[in-house]
Amino acid sequence: MKLYLALVAVAIGVYASAVNGTNSTTPAGVLDNINNIINNWLNLGTNFLVNLEHTLKYYIVKISEVVAIIMAMVGAFLYFTRLSRYTGRGLLIGAVLLYLFAEVLKSI
């Protein structure tokens, strides 16, 4: 049974190489196959990293915008109610800088 399966596998391989017009058992064919496998893995890794970069950038921008708005509201409340002018002013300046950072990151 095992011999029969091995013969079928060899026959399928010979048929596939005959249909493609190449013999993948030659040293050049084997090296081309290995090179294609490596290139496919590298392309998968590159695509994953590019998608990860876009996803992280999107979420960093969105989170920065929300945090900047919350900081500005709390800072304005503290500053204009005179509960803590220095803390309020610091929060307002930080909110402006964080929002500018988000806008710059969005344009990259």
Image (cartoon, rainbow, N blue to C red):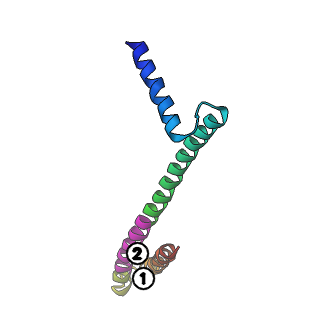
Q: Please say whether residue 99 is one of the residues in the magenta stretch.
A: no
Q: Which mark is residue 76?
A: none
Residue 68: where, in percent of width, then height? 40, 75
**Secondary structure under the numbered disc 1 in the rendered image:** helix
> What's the amino acid at mark 1?
Arg
Residue 29: where, in percent of width, then height? 62, 36
Q: Main secondary structure of the magenta part?
A: helix
- The answer to which of 82 and 57 lies nearer the viewer is 57
Q: CA distance from mark 2 to mark 1?
A: 18 Å
> What's the amino acid at mark 2?
Ala
Q: Please say whether residue 62 is one of the residues in the magenta stretch.
A: yes
Residue 38: where, in percent of width, then height? 58, 42
> Label 1, on which residue?
85
**Quarter of the figure with residue 59:** bottom left
Residue 106 located left or right of residue 83? right
Q: Is residue 87 above or below residue 56?
A: below
Residue 81 located left or right of residue 108? left
**Secondary structure under the numbered disc 2 in the rendered image:** helix
Q: Is residue 88 above or below residue 47?
A: below
Q: Which mark is residue 68?
A: 2
Q: Is residue 38 above or below residue 70?
A: above
Pointer 1 local density, CA inside 10 Å: few below 14, some 14–19, many at least 20: some
The magenta span reads 58-75
**Quarter of the figure with residue 99:** bottom left
Pointer 2 local density, CA inside 10 Å: few below 14, some 14–19, many at least 20: many
